[in-house]
Image: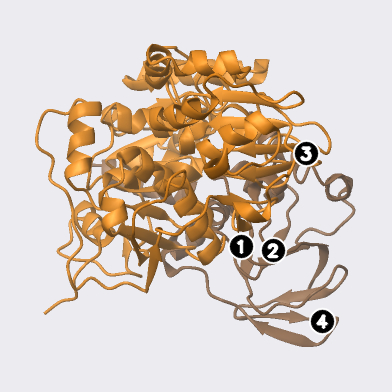
Amino acid sequence: MSQGMTVVEKILARAAGLPSVAAGEVVEPLVDLAMSHENAALVINQFQEIFEGTGLAAKVWDPSRIAIIFDHRVPAESPKTATNQKKIREFVAANGINKFHDIRGDVGGICHQILPEYGYVRPGFVVVGTDSHTTSHGALGAFSFGVGATEMASAWSLGRAVNIEVPATIKVVVSGRFPPMVGPKDLILHLIGLLTAQGANFKVLEFHGETIRTMSTSGRIAICNMSVEAGATSGIVPGDEETRRYLCEEAGIAEDIPCTLPDPDAAYVRTVEIDVSALAPQIACPHLVDNVKSITEVLGTPVQQIVIGSCTNGRLDDLAAAADILRGRKVAAGTRMLVFPASGRIFAQALDKGYLHDFMKAGAVVMNSGCGPCLGVHEGALGDNETALSTTNRNFKGRMGNPKSEVYLCSPVVAAASAITGVITDPRHA
Amino acid sequence: MAKVIIKLGNDISTDDIYPGRHMATVLPSETPQFAFSDRTDFNAFLRSKEFAPGSIIVGGENFGCGSSREQACSALKGYNVAVVAKSISRIFLQNSINLGLKVVLCPGLEANEGDDLDLGADQVTNRSTGQSFEQVRLPAARQGIMDAGGLIPYTRTLLVAGRQP
């Protein structure tokens, strides 16, 4: 009898039209969804180069399977960016790409929020994205991974991902109930610290256990999002009742969606077990995401900028938790706080629920949805020798626009508690 | 034989190689000017072009981690350098093969700036110290792309074959 398969092996077997696949085999799976943001400008160049000299018209294989979302520099910070965005709009129109989210307050937002929110990703899909945090969509049971622009241009041409090596899978089993003020962000930071920044390079993290089963899709997106910070090709949560609930209630998908589950005898290269019942808030310290410490080791570190938002932690539950702490209080003098809801829809919900008002009354600046200062290209840059505490996903040197600054990564409640004091503060005692 | 012109430590990210603020620049003819732009010494040296084609940048573990931005590869390729590292992050490795930036995986490598290396088929030999180190072969899955000279010609061949009657 043949070896059982992991979730990703099953997805790749289906997408490659094979009865089974095993880690290490080379496959060319059909792509269910191909996502890009502003770097579609480079993808378009590569795409057109592929067609040069072939005599074929440069048309994408299936415009309904391509999504393009503007988020990295919205609204444009420079003529160069604005011109790239204009070029992408023209391409989108010429190719009939409907899953296009321009700079808008209603349907705009960060790509990794828009894809789940609009039901573009489903369990069992193969998703490629020209963004390393494309791992996020494993939260919905898809095999979703980051690629470069040329690989995307190839997928736009062929509808397949070429020369994909089936990745080995690490099983992560999470048990226990989160203590107060501890949640999915602390879990994933803790796991990255355990695995190291390259501990899962070329591998998949497949999440299991009671803690995952009872976790919201929002939390699952956060942990799959940051799986790439351990080097993982993808994180994945096998679909379940919560996945169906999310797709029905929040993504508006009416039909019943089958979920791909691993076989009981699937082969894993490693199993990691984590009990979160005694976990403290976790902080990733400069300048590496795997430089993870318990908050107790860095309490009192002065911070000049607090950022709440991003594809990791800009969803409604993140904003609600932060607003609960900040309501009726003030951001410390000498500290500035920036809030970036992950999408226009979340912005409107946070507005209706009063969270944005809570933030503004506390002295925070509420910004439009987008990647904001996370990758240092647009706004919210740090000054020399300044320190930021941020709910984003990377703290590499220079990440927030200045190599002479430092970034600490944390959960939304740690960020909110620290905004009030101006130093890294334990939300369990705030 | 080629000289090591830059030696780097572990976990060199694509933010180090090509900072995010230059991401709106995409043309391979324009990206090299921003290679290591936050490391002004490296950037100035590369831009001086006072080194032989095929010169080597040595990296440690997890070279090219982080963002999928392909400019990190095109920026280095523009200087006609090779990257020899103990390990390379998945997306950077795939982007390098796709664009034809020469990369070599050599987990035990010991080399310093100024050393002369021979990049053989299976080994890297440091001529300056006399030591040899085993290479790890690149993923077999990528051989077809390397043989075709990159992902663009590889895809073009598949496309033409698939679309003809």
Determine the CA span between mark 1 and mark 4: 25 Å
Vertically, is A34 above or below B132?
above
SS type, badge 2: loop
Judge from the rendering whether residue A147 lies leftward or rightward of residue A265; answer left or right. right
Residue A153, given in percent of the width and then of the height, sits at: 44, 39
- Dots 2 and 1: beta carbons under 8 Å? yes
Question: Which residue appears at 38% of the width and 59% of the height?
Answer: A205
Q: Earlier in the sequence, mark 1 or mark 4?
A: 1
Mark 2 — on which chain does it sit?
Answer: B
Chain displayed in brown: B
Amino acid at dot 3: Gln
Circles 2 and 4: CB atoms closer than 8 Å: no
The residue beneath circle 2 is: B10
Residue picked out by circle 3: B33
Q: Callout 4, which amino acid?
A: Arg
Q: CA distance from mark 2 to mark 4?
A: 23 Å
Q: Secondary structure at mark 1?
A: loop
Residue A327: where, in percent of width, then height? Answer: 52, 21
In the image, residue B9 lies at what x, y percent? 74, 63
Residue A219 in which image quadrant = top left
Colour displayed for chain A in the image of the structure: orange
Whether labels 3 and 1 belong to a single chain: the reply is: yes
Q: Which mark is residue B62?
A: 1
Q: In terms of secondary structure, where does tag 4 sit?
A: loop
Badge 3 marks a residue whose secondary structure is: helix
Task: Name the residue that disc number 4 marks.
Answer: B127
